[in-house]
Every structure is written in C-alpha cells, then in structure tokens.
Amino acid sequence: MQQIQNGKNERPHISNVCNFTKPTESKPSLLTFNEVTTLFHEFGHGLHGMLANTNYPSLSGTNVFWDFVELPSQILENWCYEKECLDLFAKHYETGESIPMEYVEKIKASANFQEGMATLRQLSFGLLDMSWHGVDPSEINHVKEQEVKAFANTKLYPDVAENCMSTAFSHIFQGGYSSGYYSYKWAEVLDADAFEHFKDNGIFNREIGKSFAENILSKGGTENPMTLYKRFRGAEPKPEALLKRAGLLN
Ligand SMILES: [Zn+2]
C-alpha cells in the first residue's frame, strides 16, 4: 500500500495475477473476450493502488468503502467495447486485422439477453441481504416468511414453497457482504454514469482522465465516496446510464 512515512512517499507494489488461456504448441495465448474484460477490470484495481496518493496506508488505494471499490475496476471494462480502444490491441494474431466491430456489437447485443430478469434478480438479492441485516433480529420469527417479504417487490414468478435461498446465500452471512450485497448493482450505477462522462467527451479525453485519477483514484478512502464522485462528475450518479447500457431504457 502507498503511504507517506517520514516525509517520504512510499510507492506501492501492485501486481495483477490472472489465470488466462495458455498457449499451445501451435498457438500463442489467445485471450477470450471475458479474459480481456477481466484484465481491464483487474487493471482498474491496480490503478487504484498505483495512483494512490494519501498519507495513511489504511486509507490508501483500494481501502475505500465497500460499495465504492468496484468503480475503478468496472469502469475500465467499458473500454473493451469501444472501437477506438480495441483498435489499439485487439488484432488477429496471424493477419494483424483489427477485430471487426460487428463481432463486438454481437457481444454487446447478447450481453443484454434477459437483462431485465437479471437486473431484478440482482436487486432482489440486495434487498434480501438488507432485510436480514437491516432489522432487529428479534423481529424475525420465520426464515421463509422473511424471505418472501423481501422478495415481494421484485418477484416475477410465483414462489416455490420448498425454496429457501437465505440459508444457502453464503455471501450475506459468511462472505463479507453482510448488508453490502447491493454494492454490485451500485457499482454498476457508478461505472455506467462515470463512463458516460468519458463517452460524451471522448474515451481518451485527457482532462477527464486526469480528473478521474486526481479525484477518485489518488484519493483512496480519505473522503466520502459521494464527495469524490461529485468532484469528478459534477453531480451525483444517476441510474439512467446503466439502464441505457442494459438496454432497459432508450
Ligand atoms: Zn473487482
């Protein structure tokens, strides 16, 4: 972790370790699209660490509120769908031809398959998590009843009486997410809204890139995420950019 000690800015050591497709005897390592987005994602966490510029290691780099830590990583994934970015590296390993955008458009189109259901599902998990951690436990008398109540607003299909997800939802009781499961969706709101700022002004816009580095990446957890975000974006995040990206809003 980066820190300032005895007046010296100690730079961190950051590494990204990924399990990618291995080369074979006849082919080099050819990354799948998923591996490329993963690499961009993890590199975003890397940048959060590398560009950190704070006093204390406990507030440096990725030491931020749980629901803010995925913004630097998830936002980078957006570049994987942009021609300007792909043309820099996504070339056929034999012919050198850039990846045709029609392929990327197809990947984008298929990514939104059943997105409405997936969105509701993710929201329902967040609400279930909150319902367990957000009330006085003595008010909960029945696990299944509690779950049915939590799912009520996002339910698409009739409930299956035998099903009870809470008892197997390890994220919310033992996985560290306790009342923080919503952060998956919230991070998407943030990254879509923040990327829109780049998209509107050029995905390689230096000024906005600098502002992102200065106001978000370098600051770690030294200030409230909303303060940092507003300094970068000029406003609070809105869900519209995410809904548009998800194909749920025109
Ligand atoms: Zn991540």
Image (cartoon, rainbow, N blue to C red):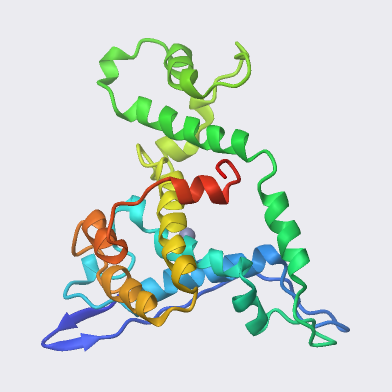
136, above or below 95, in the image: above
In this view, the residue in front, 16 or 155, is 155
Q: Residue at x 61, y 70 (%)?
A: 82
Left or right side of 163 for 135: left
| Of the pair 153 and 208, the residue shown nearer to us | 208
Does residue 128 lie above or below 79 as drawn? above
**Quadrant of res 142:** top left
Which residue is drawn at the image coordinates 32% and 62% (left, top)? Answer: 233
Q: Quadrant of residue 20?
A: bottom right
Occupied quadrant, residue 54: bottom left
Specify the farthest residue to the left.
6
- From what the image shows, is residue 115 above or below residue 164? below
The correct choice, above or below, for 74 with respect to 153 in the image is below
Q: Residue at x 61, y 77 (%)?
A: 84
- Give coordinates of residue 229: x percent, y percent: 29, 60
Q: Quadrant of the C terminus?
A: top right
Residue 1 lies, in percent from the top left, at 30, 75
Q: Position of residue 177 (x, y in %)?
A: 39, 43
Residue 69 placement (x, y as % from top left): 37, 58
Q: Is residue 42 left or right of residue 117?
A: left
